[in-house]
Amino acid sequence: MNSQNYLSKHIENLDKIFKNTYLNHIHILTNCDFELTFSKSSLGGIIISLNNDKPFIELTKEKYLFTNQNSFFARIKQKILNSKLLSIEVINNDNIVCFSFLKTTDTYDKIIYKLYVELFKNNSNIILTSNEIIIDTIHLKGFETKRPIMPQTKYLLPTNERTVKEIDEEKMDQFISNYISNIETKYLDNKYSVLKKSIKSKIKSLNNKIEKVSNDKNEAIKNLKYRNVGDYLLTNYEDNKYLNKYEIDGETYVNSTFLPLDQYIQRCYKIYKKAKQTIQISEEYINKSNIEKDYLESILSSLKVFKEEDYIETFIELDKLGYIKNKKTVRKKDIPSFKPYYVVFNNVKIGFGKNSTQNDYLTFKEAKKDYYFLHIFKDHGPHVVIFSSSPSNEIKEFASELALYLSSSTVGEVLYTQIKNVKKGDVEGKVNILKYETFNIVKFKYDIASYLLEAKRF
């Protein structure tokens, strides 16, 4: 099917559904995605996406409870909100869709407005006209230089012929479906971008400090040899008493300060003692920093499945731990923040956490000793628990894919064991595994994303 026929088919369907209904709301979802909803809200809404790669118009049943600000739509709302939709049609057999609205003013004047949506790759646009005169436009540009697009000028259709491309209808439908299901994720990612930036900045700072401390540790390791130097000089005191240069194990040591030998020996032992303390302190710091880094990286890898409440709860958790300063954020009180999530697969509940508090609660409060615990092998990620004492391989495989997906991975090993083999670690969310087996995932069999859309909290 070619692109024009594909578009015409979808627009004809939208026209049948929404014709003669009234435009109730315009939601600005992202800087390039918009939703029109009508008086018969049960029918769904119309998504207009001006994304650069594959712009589209499509029916959606998604319920969006958020909106952004956009000056263009703020202006056109005054013109077409609450107006009657007369028709939706493809214009000029091109990638241009026209929404015709009938607006009845407070003085009962009737005005026809046309909203043209130009779905051109890298040059999409939305243009509001009346009597074919442009009232407003989201972009003051067109893909043809001789075709002006600006208010108070006549709207002209493109004259250049473009190649009609063949498209795979099934793949395009899948692209649109995936795109629409990820719009809220994009919105939240933008709204809470400061969280991601703060986490990345903290991880970068930890990496820099770990590198510096590791270098100090390596230098200290080199100085451990001064114990042997001190021991050698103490044993051979008389032979070296009047020297300031010593050959020990093929290496030359110079007493450049010309200290008496007994004082130089004490200096060697002090260097050794300081090196030993530095190594111990460095190892403790590196271990602590790696735990912090794993914790932050685990959050970072889980952001793609976060809902707004997860962002808010993570803000609060990171503020409590001193990683970021949490600004005044309104949060819902109906579900405690420590409550983890679950999905149901083959009638078996599979739980997972999105932060350390939820991971701990899931594994050590909700789960029974004979339930199964899963975690990415030798990597950071959420706790996943199968609420069954005898899960089938199919359920283990699904739970393994879930563990990988929640960590932004598509392949890898996932360990699994019964809860009785899982012990609390030194910090919240960390565990020690006494014994385990692994499941190796090389390709996903299940549509994990669709299951996550149905996820509930305990």
Image (cartoon, helix red, strand yellow):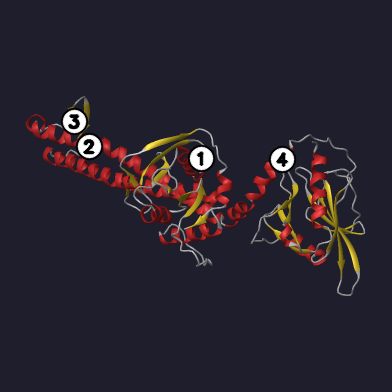
Is residue 118 visible in this depiction of the protein?
no
Is residue 271 visible in this depiction of the protein?
yes
**265 vs 174, nearest the viewer:** 174
Image side of residue 194 versus residue 145, left or right: left
Q: Nearer the viewer, mark 1 or mark 4?
A: 4
Outermost residue, bottom direction?
107
- Which is nearer the N-term, disc 4 or disc 3? 4
**Identity of the amino acid at label 3?**
Lys
Q: Which residue is mark 4?
A: 172
**Identity of the amino acid at label 2?**
Leu
| Residue in view at x 92 percent, y 59 percent | 131
Q: Which residue is mark 1?
A: 409
In the structure shown, which secondary structural element does the residue marked by tag 4 occupy?
Answer: helix
| Residue in view at x 8 percent, y 32 percent | 235
Q: Position of residue 429 (x, y in %)?
A: 38, 52
- Residue 21: quarter of image: bottom right
Q: Mark 1 and mark 2: span between their CA atoms?
A: 42 Å
Q: Position of residue 133 (x, y in %)?
A: 90, 58
Q: Mark 4 and mark 3: span between their CA atoms?
A: 79 Å
Q: Which residue is mark 3?
A: 245
Q: Nearer the viewer, mark 2 or mark 4?
A: 4
| Residue in view at x 80 percent, y 64 percent | 22
Relative to 73, is 297 above or below? above
**Identity of the amino acid at label 4?**
Met
Q: Mark 2 and mark 3: span between their CA atoms?
A: 19 Å
- Which is nearer the N-term, disc 1 or disc 2? 2
Q: Which residue is mark 2?
A: 224
Q: Mark 1 and mark 3: span between their CA atoms?
A: 59 Å
Q: Nearer the viewer, mark 2 or mark 3?
A: 2
In the structure shown, which secondary structural element does the residue marked by tag 2 occupy?
Answer: loop
Q: Are marks 1 and 3 in contact (CB under 8 Å)?
A: no
Q: Position of residue 425 (x, y in %)?
A: 32, 49
